[in-house]
Amino acid sequence: MAIIKKKTITWDASPDPDVVAHHIYVEPADQELQQGISPHARVDMPTLAMVAPDEFPPDTFLEDMDYKIGISAIDDVGNESDMVILEHPFDFIAPAAPSNIQVSDA
């Protein structure tokens, strides 16, 4: 089984005391990140981190490329803040294994 180097995404919480969760949106860098529409995950407070790719939906990082990460705050009645957005390269695809292994007498 391949070993994939993971990345931890962290953020600072909104100073609003009514925040109960954050939405984390992900799109390839060449696509528009759309709040409420783009694929996302919900992280309940007090958690302020996610490990990629493990804690994201399975089809989030399909290629080695730059992705936009958007994070918004959700308050106790469901209001959602604007997103803070970061673009970063992600590489979660292991290289192909070597092939044609052989053993011969010396």
Image (spheres, grey):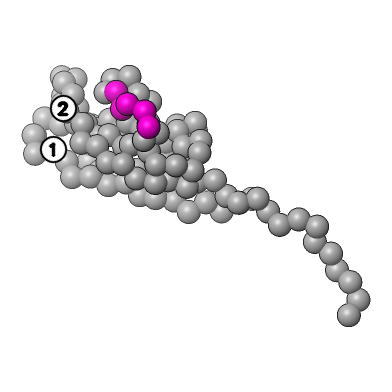
**In this figure, what is the number of numbered marks?**
2
Horizontal and vertical percent for residue 101? 80, 61
**Magenta: predominant secondary structure element?**
loop
Horizontal and vertical percent for residue 17? 8, 34
Tell me which numbered mark, 1 or 2, is placed earlier along the sequence. Answer: 1
Residue 105 position by quadrant: bottom right
Residue at 20% x, 36% y: name it. Answer: 84
Toward the viewer: 4 or 27? Answer: 27
As measured in the structure, the alpha-carbon distance from the residue carrying label 1 to the one carrying label 2 is 9 Å
Comparing marks 1 and 2, which lies closer to the viewer? Answer: 2
Left or right: residue 7 versus residue 87 is right
**Quadrant location of the C terminus in the rendered image:** bottom right
| Disc sitting over residue 81 in the figure | 2
Q: Amino acid at mark 2?
A: Ser
Residue occupying the far left of the picture: 16
Instruction: Tell me which segment is drawn in magenta.
Output: 30-34
Horizontal and vertical percent for residue 22? 24, 32
Residue at 27% x, 41% y: name it. Answer: 86
Toward the viewer: 76 or 79? Answer: 79
Q: Is residue 99 above or below residue 90?
A: below
Q: Residue under circle 1? A: 14
- Near mark 2 (Cα within 10 A), the count class, few <14, some 14-19 or many ≥20, is some
Inspect the magenta stretch and tell me whether residue 33 lies in it: yes
Inspect the magenta stretch and tell me whether residue 93 lies in it: no
Residue at 32% x, 31% y: name it. Answer: 25
Q: Secondary structure at mark 1?
A: loop
Q: Amino acid at mark 1?
A: Ser
Horizontal and vertical percent for residue 9? 32, 46
- Mark 1 and mark 2 in contact? Answer it, CB < 8 Å: yes
Residue 16 position by quadrant: top left
